[in-house]
Image (spheres, helix red, strand yellow):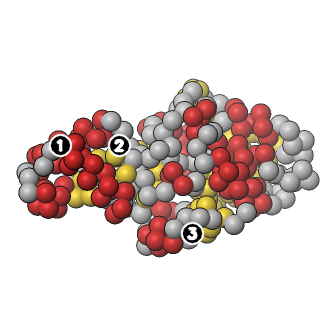
Amino acid sequence: MLTTHRKKLILSRLAGDGHIIAKDLAREFGTSEDTIRRDLRELAQAGKLQRVHGGALPSSAAIGDLQVRENVFPQEKIALGRFGAGMIEHGQLVILDGGTTAMQVARHLDPSLRATIVTHSPTVAVQLAAHPLIDIIVLGGRLFRHSMVGVGASVIDAASRLRADLYFMGVTGVHPDAGLSTGDAEEAAVKRALHERAAETVVLASTEKLMAASPFLVASLHDLSLLVVPRRTPERTVRRLRTAGVTVQKCNS
């Protein structure tokens, strides 16, 4: 079997099954595990998949910078943002992560809402400034330009002093086995710190993040209070995610 054909089959199998095991593919294709591992390594270097021990998972398409991600499933993110905004109640202290979906949450807040919102994203903070009844707390740190969020020890230290009702966590990968993941180690550390300081954590996940994985683990799916997915998410995907112990709700707006 030609290498190009074998790689196409690997990606096709990955898209259908959500994961692949190297030794099983080697047996099926009649080749060595070393050959399959080399294929996986080259596909990973090309950004086509995420290697894990013994095989691979789909790579997240949500790894571009903020400007790129704004053009990925924008209508889904508007609907998810509207749903998330509707979850916030008067008087709550809410942590709002960075990212394109978080921007939509900020844009769809009820104009009469009185709440305190904490964010480590300057772009989200600017969006929140349009709501005069909301108190805004910005956690400062080194600016990670890729996602336009603050990262580092100062953000984590400030997070340790919070006691939030709700945290809207942004991630690039949501997978029943690989959990919630993102593409940067420092960003993942900040997300873990914020998650630990919230009574409930919610992920609003657009299609490109589902059944995909990024290099750095943030938390397991069962650590979430709620995973909200787009209305057209296949039931098969919803069932797979629920097997990880998370409550999944489709966003119908």
User: Earlier along the polypeptide chain: callout 2 or callout 3?
Assistant: 2
Are the two marked residues, 1 and 2, in contact with CB atoms closer than 8 angstroms? no
Judging by the rendered image, the residue that carries numbered circle 2 is: 48
State the SS at label 1.
helix
| Circle 3 crowding by C-alpha within 10 Å: few under 14, some 14–19, many from 20 | some
Residue plotted at (58% across, 39% down): 69
- On screen, residue 194 versus residue 48, left or right, reads right
**Residue 201, numbered label:** none
Say which quarter of the image contains residue 21: bottom left
Residue plotted at (64% across, 42% down): 100
| Cα distance in 3D space between marks 2 and 3 | 27 Å
Of residues 193 and 146, the one drawn nearer to the viewer in this rendering: 146
Judging by the rendered image, the residue that carries numbered circle 1 is: 3
User: Earlier along the polypeptide chain: callout 3 or callout 1?
Assistant: 1
State the SS at label 2.
loop
Percent x, y of residue 63? 48, 39
| Cα distance in 3D space between marks 3 and 1 | 39 Å
Instruction: Using the rendered image of the protein, determine whether residue 155 is visible from the camera's viewpoint.
Output: no
State the SS at label 3.
strand
Q: Amino acid at mark 1?
A: Thr
Q: Amino acid at mark 3?
A: Val
User: Earlier along the polypeptide chain: callout 1 or callout 2?
Assistant: 1
Instruction: Using the rendered image of the protein, determine whether residue 36 is visible from the camera's viewpoint.
Output: yes
| Circle 1 crowding by C-alpha within 10 Å: few under 14, some 14–19, many from 20 | few
| Circle 2 crowding by C-alpha within 10 Å: few under 14, some 14–19, many from 20 | some
Residue plotted at (19% across, 55% down): 22
Residue plotted at (78% across, 45% down): 107
Q: Amino acid at mark 2?
A: Lys
Judging by the rendered image, the residue that carries numbered circle 3 is: 248
Percent x, y of residue 253? 73, 63
Say which quarter of the image contains residue 86: bottom right
